[in-house]
Amino acid sequence: MSAGTGYNFAYLDESTKRMIRRALLKAVAIPGHQVPFGSREMPLPYGWGTGGIQVTAAILGPRDVLKVIDQGADDTTNAVSIRRFFGRVAGVATTERTEQATVIQTRHRIPEAPLQEGQTLVYQVPIPEPLGRLEPRIAETRRLHALADYGLMHVKLYEDIAHHGAIAKAYDYPVMVNGRYLMSPSPIPAFDNPKMHRMPALQLFGAGREKRIYAVPPYTDVRSLDFEDHPFRPIRAPHACALCGSDVSYLDEVVTDDRGGRMFVCSDTDYCTTRQGARDAAE
Amino acid sequence: MTDALLSARGLTLRFGAVPALVDVDLDIWPGEVVAIVGESGSGKTTLLRVLSGLQQAQAGSVRYRGAEVSAMGEAALRRLMRTEWGFVHQNPRDGLRMGVSAGGNIGERLMAKGARHYGNIRAEAEAWLRRVEIEPARIDGLPRTFSGGMQQRLQIARTLVTHPRLVFMDEPTGGLDVSVQARLLDLIRGLVSELGLAVLLVTHDIAAARLLAHRILVMRRGEVVEQGLTDRVLDDPQHAYTQLLVSSVLAA
């Protein structure tokens, strides 16, 4: 019991955590395979990270340092709320620094700073099923996964090239995990896909509404699907960050006024402020 | 004599009191076209479903190249279905993906087999469209914008693109008007001899059977009442039911 809140440590009761941990262990043992779990009602709406928050609650220990990002930013409503939530119900230390965090819950981004062994990245996943839009029957998609029958996904990519001249998927770009399971990487930009490949950190995915957990263990092969003559290309806005000048980070386009003014800034706020700080220190 | 590609022995299946298959034996050799004819409800389609592993018989065995089909796992059966076997449905809507372009439909089996070069897949799809007499310019068109005959030809292209050994056809000319039927039959006959396919053709159209098949099985109430070379069976029917069937064909 964390002091004074009336909640069990990290909000969820111990038997729920045990159930989620069992699902997590199974997920880690079968990289990319979706494991069903008994998703609980959480004190935030579906679509705001109910899956990620349950996974985080299940793995959080008292000595963990938690970082929460939403679209790469530490200072958006969702990130601030979830960070404050765990600060209160678990009493864990929180940080905005990627290097200092042991657990990072994320929505839609992988931090720019390379993650290390011992760190865990928890993704909030809205739609875990990569074949869902192509095959509406869940029972059939599960059969396709079981038989590794993924021709359908390539048909979709073929159609994209036939109609648009390129694979028209800029986010939630499907990946093959460990050469076996097709996986939806949650709606991270395709730009972040290469970071998942052989990442030293553990990657856990929680989908609360769809009640699925899946995982990519450290140093696992994660390949983005493509064609030999249309290879996978991570997409990035062709600009430099207006604040820190980075020309390798993923950028957000921000509208600054109603006369067409706009600027491109890093979506990863920690990366951007760190670089600004280093530049100011050098001057 | 070489071994049969597909051989069935003693297939029996009842739907309640209705006998669908009664002790059916059947062999198909490589490159051979076998037609199963009979009236509606005689068990033709059920036989096709049992032979292709979609349905289990209550007794008897089906062996494909020596392996028992009913003992194959679902994974092995699916692999057969997308590599060595093909299935042409009566209604092209059952065999095509209606929301996917013609090129994507033809490419699906190639990609399921591991083709990963877009240019090659597209070139192959174009070649097949030409082969089944569809304008290659319509490669990006959706099947729902195609006529019934074109849809059926597209389904054939999609099935044959991976060069299967054995193709199951369930009334491939059903629901098409007569002139389109004739062209389709002509096309199928050409492709079958060119690719050396073995075909199991289910039809109630005696004329189609005569045009395509080397051998004919006549079914009635789940039983094979007569079988033999096409011309022999149709020109000199022995069984009373076959005689009735042959004499019922309308001459134009």
Image: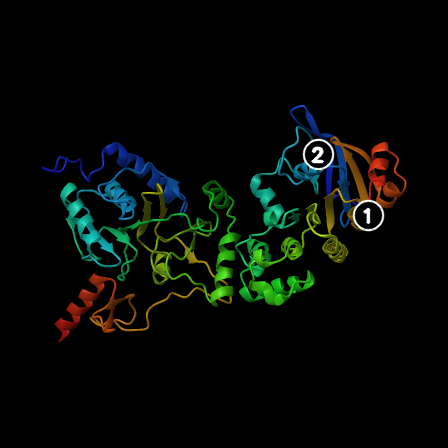
Label 2 resides on the chain identified as B
Residue A45 percent coordinates (x, y): 25, 44
Instruction: Identify which residue is drawn at 44% across, 51% down.
Output: A133
Residue B135 percent coordinates (x, y): 64, 65
Q: What element carries label 2?
A: loop
* Residue type indicated by callout 2: Gly
Left/right placement of residue B214 relative to residue B155 reads: right
Between A241 and A61, which is closer to the camera in this rendering? A241
Q: Mark 1 points at which residue?
A: B210
Residue A200 percent coordinates (x, y): 32, 54
Give the farthest residue toward the front.
B252
Numbered circles on residues, count = 2
Tell me, yes or no, if residue B204 can be seen here: yes
Q: Eyeballing the image, is B49 above or below A183?
A: above
Residue B157 lies in what quarter of the image? bottom right
* Residue type indicated by callout 1: Arg
Instruction: Identify which residue is drawn at 25% across, 42% down.
Output: A59
Whether pointer 1 and pointer 2 mark residues with C-beta atoms closer than 8 Å, the reply is no
Image quarter of the N terminus of chain A: top left
Q: Name the residue under label 2.
A: B41
Give the CA distance from mark 1 to mark 2. 21 Å
N-terminal-most mark, 1 or 2: 2
